[in-house]
Amino acid sequence: MNLIERVKNIIITPKTEWEKIATEEQSLSSVISTYVVPLAVAGAIATFIGWAFIGIDYGFFRMKGIGWGVKMAVIQLISSIVGVIVTAFIVDALAPSFGSEKNINRSAQLVAYGYTPSFIGALLGVLPSIGWLGGLFGLYGIYLIYLGLGPMKKTPEDKKVIYMVVTIVILIVVYLILGLILGSLLGTRLPAASLSL
């Protein structure tokens, strides 16, 4: 799998790409190491650059510097990787409730590839003042997950919408909780500022 091709295809021709992904045997660890980590690292680097060298003004305070860059990049990186893993396990646990196939590897593929627009949106972290716009990219991810439920989880047509809604709510909650925890641990007053939901 070529990373750039997969990103391009899942965004431009998602129906075709989901069918192709459904024929691939990928483990959870493989999806994380070959897809999630490289894209999460790219977002973290953009976030580091944005907060370390450009920064942002909050009232009378200027948030900028290497320390801010490192903290926000760590939040971005860890929340992206851990968030995909945790969400994949929750999606897999819920699968039988929606007449879907329970398979952690397929759940990992669904979540990771469905999250692609948010990974791309995280690159806007290079400009912290507009970094939040990257979160809007994630809205397209909702559509991607909807399209992926059939091929990846064998979800019946009549249960796709509710399964997708539950999946998205879980994804948002997981990322917000991770952002709050990491923000508290790292001492930022902006726990979810670099997240792209």
Image (cartoon, grey):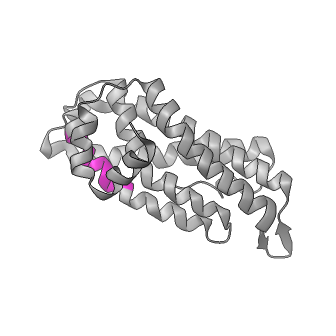
Looking at the image, is 80 positioned above or below residue 47? above
Residue at figure coordinates x 70%, y 49% from the top left: 73
Q: Residue 23 is drawn in which quadrant? A: top left
Residue at figure coordinates x 27%, y 45% from the top left: 17
Position in image of residue 137 (x %, y %):
45, 62
> In screen coordinates, is 33 left or right of 57?
left
Looking at the image, is 182 positioned above or below residue 64? above
Q: Residue 178 is drawn in which quadrant? A: top right
Position in image of residue 79 (x %, y %):
60, 42
Say which quadrant the N terminus sits in: top left
Q: Is residue 162 magenta?
A: no
> In screen coordinates, is 41 left or right of 9?
right
Q: Is residue 45 visible?
A: yes
Position in image of residue 172 (x %, y %):
48, 49
Residue at figure coordinates x 40%, y 23% from the top left: 27
Position in image of residue 157 (x %, y %):
13, 44
> In screen coordinates, is 63 left or right of 4?
right
Q: Is residue 178 visible?
A: no
Q: Is residue 147 magenta?
A: yes
Residue at figure coordinates x 28%, y 31% from the top left: 95
* Segment tinted magenta in the rendering: 141-150
